[in-house]
Image (cartoon, coloured by chain):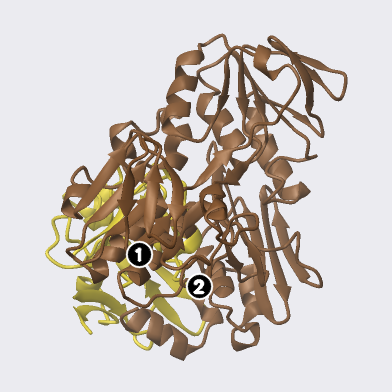
Chain colours: A yellow, B brown
Amino acid sequence: MKRVYVNEKWCLGCHLCEYNCAFANSGEKDMASALKGKPIYPRIHIDGDEKISFAVSCRHCTDPICVKSCISGALHSKDGVICVDSDKCVGCLTCILVCPYGALVQGENGTLTKCELCLENSCSQPACAAGCPNQAIVYEER
Amino acid sequence: MSNYVIIGNGVAAVGCIEGIRREDKLSPITVISKEEHPVYCRPLISYYLEGKTSLSKMNYRDEDFYTKNGCDVLYGKSAVKIDAEGHTVTLDDSSQIQYTSLCVASGSSPIILPIPGLESVERRFTFMTLDDALALEKAISKDSRVLIIGAGLIGLKCAEGICERVGSVTVCDLAPRVLSSILDNECASLMQKKLEEHQINFLLSDTVERFENNVAFMKSQKSVKFDVLVMAVGVRPNFSIVKEAGGETSRGILVNEHMESSLCGVYAAGDCTEGTDISLGQRRVIAILPNAYMQGRCAGINMAGGDDLFDKGIPMNSIGFFGLHAMSAGSYFDAPEGELYEEKSEGKIRRLYTRGGYLTGFMFVGDTNRVGIYTSLIRERTPLDSINFDLLKKISTFTAFSSETRGKKFGGVV
């Protein structure tokens, strides 16, 4: 299965992935109306310090503890892609309590929002990888 | 061909079914369900009353779950006896079911305190099952005065769920603070303040001594008039069926890391069990949903001839009221000789408890961003000298780990 991977040696910490992610999942047609002057809710985040940067998003684990721990049945695995049914999610944040990667975040309405590899939006591939200027983020089989 | 039987139809039972089906796609599974409902998300009953979910969304699995997994569910039936030698379970209608392996996932029951005069209270409820929530919903109106006994997770979620739908809510508890099993005084007082902002009243360090119809006479000499009573003082594991069959029990059914009870061919999972809390290194009942699923799944895999271990059990809770979240995990109150690190700012607290070079527990209130990094340190028993823990004390970041670790976690399949 193809997943999103980051090579920290190449990550510039430019945060473009965050903007591309938020735009890809906004449902808007252009980036300005999607993001300008609004709080954004990307599903990928830059972690790092002054020396090193790396993008963190859902690892789509083979044995996902978030799915096992979800109290609402909202988190599930669809052919290996960990998806959230935001209609079922009640925002209890148990998934954030258990995700070992710190990859999950609350969305605008308080429920979970997470990377679904851009399979459910209009992008044909993860927007974070497609827009990464240094190809630090890639979408591939490993 | 095996014949699997599961006593119970909650989350641990689902874990067990999914575990069995990983190994064995064909053999029949019989599920004995006391409740007349397909598996639903029990912790969502307060969200249902609050209007944040609906009955149809509360299903834990899709409608075709049982058919797809070849399960025969016996609704409205209880198991009353296990014959471990004869490999049979007897039901309350006297029928018997043969099994090759059995999983007891019988959950827990709400504790009812035998307070004098309780039987004179006309509208009294517990708050554990969907039927409890539906009955409570029928009993309340916008003018109801509700008294909740118990300021733990269940009582407070109940209070949050109904507070907009009733006249008043008062919560009493013998403990001096709310959420006393998981939070200390300072963390608890932040949560209490948030609840009080929503007109939920508290009578702490106080308890009901007797009831007379719709009046509760408190230990503090106060009296509380109410229309509806909810008793939410805790739960007790349902393990008598295993005890009577000769299985080892203490506060729950004793299980090993394979989820085997002491009875041959009998496994147990979920709230009814007493397993090991690795953050404490002692046996403990850990009645939380993630444990129920993981134990159930482990039991199922082993029942069907696979080999699985569940050796990472710890207490952990994420609880929020009106947008303020608290997360806790591991052990702190019972843990001696530990060290505490704390960080505080306006409306936020983080407390990390370490012992012998390991993180053994934490409480976070307010900022709960990326808390799972800490939960993982407890579950995996990561030696703190292998990471930059001083940095992690202050911020939730993966820069505290080695480049090699990051390479594996973010550059490989995990």
Answer few, some or many: residues within 10 Å of disc 1's Cα (few below 14, many 20 plus, some between 14 and 19).
many
Q: Position of residue B67 (x, y in %)?
A: 17, 48
Say which element carries label 1: helix
- State which quadrant residue B284 falls in: bottom right
Image: B18 above or below B153: below
Residue sitting at x 70%, y 54%: B345
On screen, residue B388 versus residue A119, left or right, reads right
* Image coordinates for residue B244, horizontal then vertical, percent: 56, 51
Residue carrying label 1: B300
SS class, disc 2? loop
**Quarter of image, res A7:** bottom left
- Disc 1 + disc 2, Cβ < 8 Å: no
Residue that mark 2 sits on: B257
Residue placed most toward the observer, B406 or A99? A99
Which chain does the numbered disc 1 sit on? B
Residue B75, image x, y percentages: 31, 37
In the displayed image of the protein, which residue is found farthest to the front? B86
